[in-house]
Image: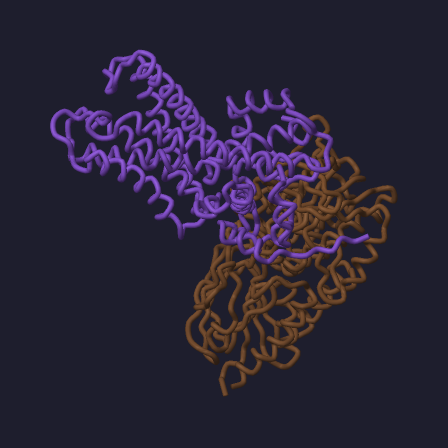
Chain colours: A purple, B brown
Amino acid sequence: MSEQIKPDLKFINSVINAGGESLKKCFQCATCSVVCKVTPDDKPFPRKEMVQAQWGLKDKLLSNPDIWLCHQCSDCTAYCPRGAKPGEVLGAIRKLSIEHYAFPSFVGKAVADPKFLLLTFAVPVLIFGAVLMALGNLKIPDGEIVYAEKFMPVPVIDAVFIMSAIFAMIGFGVGITRYWKDLTSGTKVKGLPMAAIMATVTEFLAHKKFKTCEETVDRSRSHLFTFYGFVGLAITTTWAIVYLYGMQWLSPYPLRDPMKIFGNLSAASLLIGITLVIINRLKHAEKAGSGSYFDWLFIGVIFTIVTTGLLSEILRLLHVPVLAYPVYFIHLVVVFFLFAYAPFSKMAHMVYRTTALVYAKHTGRDKA
Amino acid sequence: MAENKKVLVIGGGFSGLTAAVETAEAGSEVIIVEKTPFFGGRVTQLNKYFPKLCPPNCGLEINFKRIKNSGDVAYHTLAEVEKITGQEGAFEVTVKIKPRYVNDKCVGCNACAEACPVEMPNEFNFGLDTTKAAYITHNQAFPFIYAIDDRYCKGKACGKCAEACKYNAIDLDMKPETITLKVSSIILAAGWDLYDVSKLDNLGGGKIKNVITNMQMERLASPNGPTAGKVLRPSDGKEVKNIAFVQCAGSRDENHLPYCSFICCMASLKQATYVREQYPDAKAEIFYIDIRTPGRYEQFYWKVKDDPNVTLTKGKVAGITEDPATGDVILEAEDIFGGKKIRRSFDMVVLAAGMVPSTKNSKIPVEVSLTPDGFVLPATLQKGIYAVGTLKSPVDVAKSVQDATGVAIKSIQSARR
């Protein structure tokens, strides 16, 4: 019996608008599935995703673990005889999947759409602006630069970021629960597959998948720097909490303090990583595609976080208050953006990809 | 009316020969210049050609005979046009003629080739074997006069061919000459080259021994080819019982040739029959994006498809590797209908490489606009100059012949205006 296909035209257009404008060029030759080094042999991607997207088969795509098995090496895009850029199209589908599972969904829509860019940034600007106004700190303070005491008190920062982290956790929790339900519907998967989780984490820590890329193999290095930069900064933050609340020791901390050294090294790693990301993206644009709004928003936020973070420190040490305080303000705004909108921006890939990989390993779809 | 009614045809392949004989038989004087030492072009290199699957001589011999019988056709081999000036009715064409080192006293006895100590790659067989520097391409070549390739020949320092020749036909002192032709109209029939498969890095890049091109396959199957028509694979001469064809090897690919080369699907279907007819137990598999059978060729496709030993697999081959132990070739493709990535091993693999207009490798000395792929846009040619066949788009022999016949009329009109 043949299956009747009802194309979802709106979905086709949303793939096209999300960075998959080359979608319709695909003529299903399957070069992509063959040159892809990370696809399974059985029902390989991305050829089938290309035809599913052309036909608007939304349900087949958004909950499809294969879109996350793809690491956008772009070998497919480089060898595509039609310029259909399967790597970019799968990136667009991933974006739509993040948006689809977003909770609350209006935040998902706002982060995904350039029309709401200013609005999404206005939220942290207004929050931090209101705090400064209430404290009467809406001016450049005199004397030695101390961000915490003279500008934005630590308890306020902690309160705002704890709230935004809770907001993000709820978003991730609901999103990933929905996604896991869709993934496992009709299968016998029950409970948490611990072995698959361990396999995914060990593979990820060494970036094994990334290293199989050919066209853009240098991405494994840039992503590794970025990832471990973030890991280091997370450790630094925990360390600082111990100093502040455990030892009642207030910032700024001396440059030779081990926590400070560790934090600065992590920031350097992040800066190197994200700069390499940008360089690689530009270098490979011709063969691998130039990326979407969603990609560049995420890259831009991380780049701004690390540069404003380092500049806040440098400007404080050089004592340039007129620049230091505004830069620090921007830093707080972009960090808020990254935290609060994590389930809706490309940052969500860390959760969705990990989940898809766990599922794929558990079901034998991904063997490596 | 122009005083000079001569028509110049540049290129002595099937298109050029057809245009020349049709023009001459309508009463105009014709001159053909051919870059290589022999006429017949690409068709000469085929084993059989569509639509009737005749051996090439079947059509070429008639044309050669018509040229010989017509008093109105002059021809030059090893001749390349360097400059064209003037206008319709009064073109002046500078032609450089390279030395053949053999004159028309040659009777084709092969003594020079036997005496020649130099082996060179056989370009006529696309490098599948070697030939002597004093050579003839095959036993029905036209003109049937040997040629000496001075890129390899050691010249008078050796001179063994001249000693061996009983007819005084060899002249190693022959020098290049430049002639000027005055003609009324010009037909461009410079034809096509095969796409350079070394650019297809994921298909072995021309480095795997048992991966050959479709034109090499024609030579392997041809009775006057390197194996006298037995389809044996290059690495070890093993009979090819399990062959695969890789369609669109370069064609329909923005990174290589963005257009469909028109002939390759039919060529591979035809070549599958070469192997099937030669070895009753042989298997052939054709990997394709779409099988294209222009015009009335559909029935040939049905015939090949109905052969239980021929498999047509939808899915473009995008990876080719060699099994170093056996010399077998491993193809990687997605079997689209089966939904699986497959790796299959074959005795030999044929790349269905595409057609490239000869303008890509040698510029035509006329003002003309070309498509980005090098095809001539005929409307942009100067009045009195016409292009035929594969210079304008990828076409088969039958379509080239029709086109050449039509262009013959145009050139006669130019000559009589």
What is the residue that sits farthest to the bottom in this orientation? B1
Work out whether residue A102 or residue A278 is closer to the camera in this orientation and state it. A102
Does residue A181 appear to the left or right of A331 in the view shown?
right
Rendered residue at 60%/56% (across/down): B355
**Camera sees residue A202:** yes
Rendered residue at 71%/64% (across/down): B294
Work out whether residue B276 or residue B62 is closer to the camera in this orientation and state it. B276
Q: Can you tell which quarter of the image residue A180 is in? A: top right
Q: Position of residue B398 (x, y in %)?
A: 70, 67
Say how many tags the image has. Answer: 0
Q: Position of residue A228 (x, y in %)?
A: 42, 23
Rendered residue at 24%/25% (across/down): A148
Does residue B213 appear to the left or right of A202 in the view shown?
right
**Camera sees residue B199:** no
Q: Is residue B79 above or below residue B117?
A: below
Q: Quadrant of the C terminus of chain A?
A: top right
Q: Is residue A300 above or below residue B401?
A: above
What is the residue that sits farthest to the left in this orientation? A143
Q: Position of residue B135 (x, y in %)?
A: 64, 48
Work out whether residue A330 or residue A169 is closer to the camera in this orientation and state it. A169
